[in-house]
Image (spheres, rainbow, N blue to C red):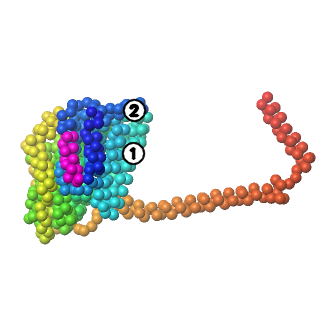
Amino acid sequence: MTLLLPPFLFFYAAIACLLLGNAKQRSIILIVVPLISLVWIAFTDTGSHASLEMAGLTLEFMRVDRLSRIFGIIFSIAAFLSALYAWHVKDIMQQVATLGYAGAAIGGVFAGDLLTLFLYWEGTAVTSVFLIWARRTEGAYHTGIRYLIIQVLSGVLLLMGLLLHYRDTGSLAFEAMTLGTLGTWLIFLSFGMKCAFPLMHNWLQDSYPAATVTGTVVLSAFTTKMAVYALARGFPGTEILIYIGAVMTLFPIFFAEIENDLRRVLAYSLNNQLGFMVVGVGIGTPMAINGTAAHAFCHILYKALLFMSVGAVLYRTGTSKASELGGLYKTMPKTAIFCLIGAASISAVPLFSGFVSKSLILSAAGNQGYWLVWGALLIASAGVLSHSGIKIPFTAFFAKDSGKRPAEAPTHMLWAMGITAALCIGIGVAPGALYALLPYDVEYHPYSFDHVLTQFQLLAFALLAFIVLMKTGLHPHEMKATNIDSDWIYRRITPRLVPVVGRAIDTGWSGITQTLVGLFGRGVAQIGKFSEPRGLLARGWGINSMVLILTALMGLVLLFNFGKS
């Protein structure tokens, strides 16, 4: 039974795709395996379903409980939708990487110990980078290298942390931990790096837009949400996460507003939405953890829908730059409608999925008295409406007539977007099915009068602000430029510092080696003088000299023995 666990099914499928020469057969495998995984996870009882005793350690490969189950379900759904969206892809690299990546992510959320988590953690890093390299451009290659360095570094921190944690506690169980030791801090930083904490976040905006059209959709679903799950499992109620999450919701707003590439706008928006989930983990109450799980579930869907719609535009027009788009609703009306549904969902418009998940986190923050954080989340919600709810569909489909008349998205892409859009609306209209999957029992009604009124007021004022800024010309214009934030360190500073540091090290090392070589040479020369024909060692020693030396040595021996006695 162990060999038929969902992660292994994905790995077997990846191996099968490597052996198959028929691209259509590979596409069918990518569709079928996630559905099998979904059924297995949905109908399997909670508990441990696969453990291994090795070197005195218990490795738990499949721990099913309500927290891991909901993430496993949405990961399987995301893998299916991504495969349907990518039905046209014949590239074996992308197909194998997608299966391996999804399998490692699903394995990660069911890992019952830190060592097993580490194996899957690194598995997601190694497999996902091929979705970037599959674009086969020089820029994608360099971006993939940067991405891989960050992901592997996160794994190294996790490995160091779990070893120190095992030394301190004697256990590798993946359960709630308390910050206070070097081991737990390293594990925390590892999770934070993959969750795109502030100043550790820019790998996300750098790499996701650099992937292929379909690869970006796959990437948006797994890595960061696996990190959210890891935080919810390992550090629930860690108060510092509340403030980290609040910052995460706010700082991407500015960068998303001035960004020209719509896929980078969505990457910043993804960072913003992760902040809501991190706040929920930090609060740590049952309602907050439910909110984190629900928002991760809904976010995977509506973010995938937005990436799909922008990806379809990129697929048909060859660009995702806002400055080069506009008026596409004329020939891509279905894609425009699906984009609007994704925009309404991420903006938490009532009757859409984001409303019923985000409200849990906002209510949890208010119930625990975090009113400043609650206010920050409201501001962030307004910002999301501006840059993702309005800017993306407006600039791509309605703002102006770019003169482009591309064909509608391919049928399989429309089906993938249609199913995702239906889920976004269905969850928003009837959230009971989602609430039934949450880690804790839910007694919550999102459609209270106060909550609906507050949300409509927020949306109305955010829309009004956008209109005023556009009419007055104060809204940032889309420009053909590359905006940088924390990647300024490795894009500007590092290239300048590396040569300077390299020259300093080279100069210092040269000085040290020259000094050592000089000392060694002088020492050898001095020894050589002793062995010359007239040197000290070449001279004859007279009997008197030898007797004197032996007498002195014997005297020393007698003194030594006398002292001991």
Tell me the SS state at disc 1.
Answer: helix
Indicate the quadrant containing the C terminus: top left, top right, bottom left or bottom right.
Answer: top right
Any magenta on residue 31?
yes
Q: Nearer the viewer, residue 185 or 1?
A: 1
Work out whether 481 lies above or below 154.
below
Where residue 454 appears, as percent x and y from the top left, is: 11, 47
Kind of residue sitting beneath label 1: Leu
Q: Position of residue 278 (x, y in %)?
A: 26, 44
- Identify which residue is drawn at 18% across, 38% down: 39
Look at the image and say whether residue 81 sits in the magenta stretch.
Answer: no
Residue 434 in the image: x percent, y percent?
A: 15, 40
Q: CA distance from mark 2 to mark 1?
A: 23 Å
Who's the residue at 18% across and 65% down the image? 317
Q: What segment carries the magenta color?
A: 22-38
Q: Residue furthest top?
A: 565
* Amino acid type, label 2: Met
- The answer to whether 229 appears left or right of 171 in the picture is left
Mark linked to residue 54: 2
Dominant secondary structure, magenta: helix
The residue tagged 1 is: 157
Q: Residue at x 10, y 48 (%)?
A: 422
Which is closer to the viewer, label 2 or label 1?
Answer: 2
